[in-house]
């Protein structure tokens, strides 16, 4: 479709800058797709439209219309990005009542059991061999049961973990609990909060500075920072 319109599939107008469209990572939480769930959703829509009983149940059709419209708005408003599946997850979950409604109408028990077993079976590889949070030890990747909680925050970016730890210790050494933070495009801020809360007994305060959107106009009241950290692929 892109080629027929003379568009590059990685055009910045439709694809997130500095990324390339690709379908990879079947067991990666950042990029794994939901093909089985999508198939169930499509079948459920068809089933409801073909069933007088289902489509005349109160609020069923308005609920479907709302979800379809939400998906269309999602596609028009947001550019394609590698972590699109995370943003779509709420919509996938919101389809569950419709899928359950259709499955409940199936008279053949074997058909219902087949669908449920298929869902469970296809989830097992993702559960046991998740590339970043595995249940069992696999090579250099430790199980979530044998690795400490803090290190698991950095499973997808182990190369930046040491920077975060060193920065948190440095702030404790200089007794600095008011920190200004400058973020990049793909920033891991949450691990810094966790590590600082572990290092300090008193409350810490972190505020964003050099913000280039509308929220940057909101004044920071009574905030005098003693250190500023720039976070992107590491911390500075």
Image: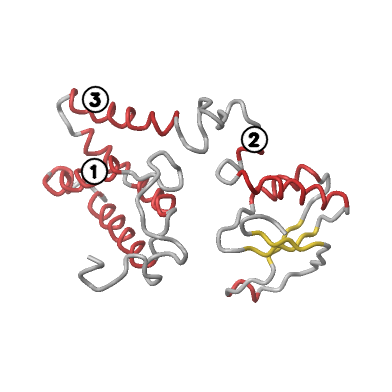
Q: Secondary structure at mark 2?
A: helix
Q: Quadrant of the N terminus?
A: bottom left
Q: Nearer the viewer, mark 3 or mark 2?
A: 2
Q: Position of residue 181 (x, y in %)?
A: 70, 62
Residues tagged 3 and 2 counted as in contact (Cβ below 8 A): no
Q: Secondary structure at mark 3?
A: helix
For marks 3 and 2 on the same chain, the one whose residue lies earlier in the sequence: 3
In this image, 130 relative to 112: left or right? right
Residue displayed at 74% across by 46% down: 165
For marks 2 and 1 on the same chain, the one whose residue lies earlier in the sequence: 1
For marks 3 and 1 on the same chain, the one whose residue lies earlier in the sequence: 1
Gap between marks 3 and 2, in whole Å?
37 Å
- Marking on residue 149: 2
Q: Is residue 224 above or below residue 171?
A: below
Residue displayed at 40% across by 48% down: 89
Q: Position of residue 38 (x, y in %)?
A: 27, 45
Packing grade of label 3 (10 A; few <14, some 14-19, many >=20) is few
Gap between marks 2 and 1, in whole Å?
36 Å
**Residue that numbered label 1 is attached to:** 39
In this image, 126 relative to 225: left or right? left
Nearer to the camera, 62 or 150: 150
Q: Position of residue 61 (x, y in %)?
A: 22, 52
- Marking on residue 113: 3
Gap between marks 3 and 1, in whole Å?
17 Å
Residue displayed at 63% across by 46% down: 159
């Amino acid at each position: 479709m892109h080629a027929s319109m003379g568009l590059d599939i990685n055009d910045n107008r439709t694809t997130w800058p500095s990324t390339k469209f690709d379908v990879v990572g079947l067991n990666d939480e950042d990029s794994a797709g939901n093909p089985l769930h999508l198939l169930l959703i499509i079948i459920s829509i068809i089933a409801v439209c073909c069933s007088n009983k289902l489509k005349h149940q109160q609020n069923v059709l308005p609920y479907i219309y709302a979800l379809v419209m939400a998906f269309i708005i999602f596609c028009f408003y947001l550019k394609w990005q590698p972590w699109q599946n995370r943003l779509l997850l709420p919509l996938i979950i919101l389809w569950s009542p419709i899928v359950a409604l259709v499955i409940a109408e199936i008279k053949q028990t074997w058909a219902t059991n087949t669908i449920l077993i298929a869902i469970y079976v296809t989830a097992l590889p993702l559960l046991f061999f998740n590339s970043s949070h595995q249940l069992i030890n696999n090579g250099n990747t430790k199980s979530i049961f044998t690795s400490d909680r803090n290190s698991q925050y950095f499973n997808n970016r182990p190369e930046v973990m040491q920077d975060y730890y060193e920065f948190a210790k440095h702030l404790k050494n200089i007794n600095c609990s008011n920190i200004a933070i400058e973020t990049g495009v793909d920033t891991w801020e949450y691990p810094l909060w966790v590590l600082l809360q572990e290092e300090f007994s008193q409350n810490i305060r972190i505020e964003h500075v050099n913000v280039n959107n509308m929220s940057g106009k909101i004044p920071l009241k009574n905030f005098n920072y003693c250190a500023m950290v720039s976070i992107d692929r590491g911390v500075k």
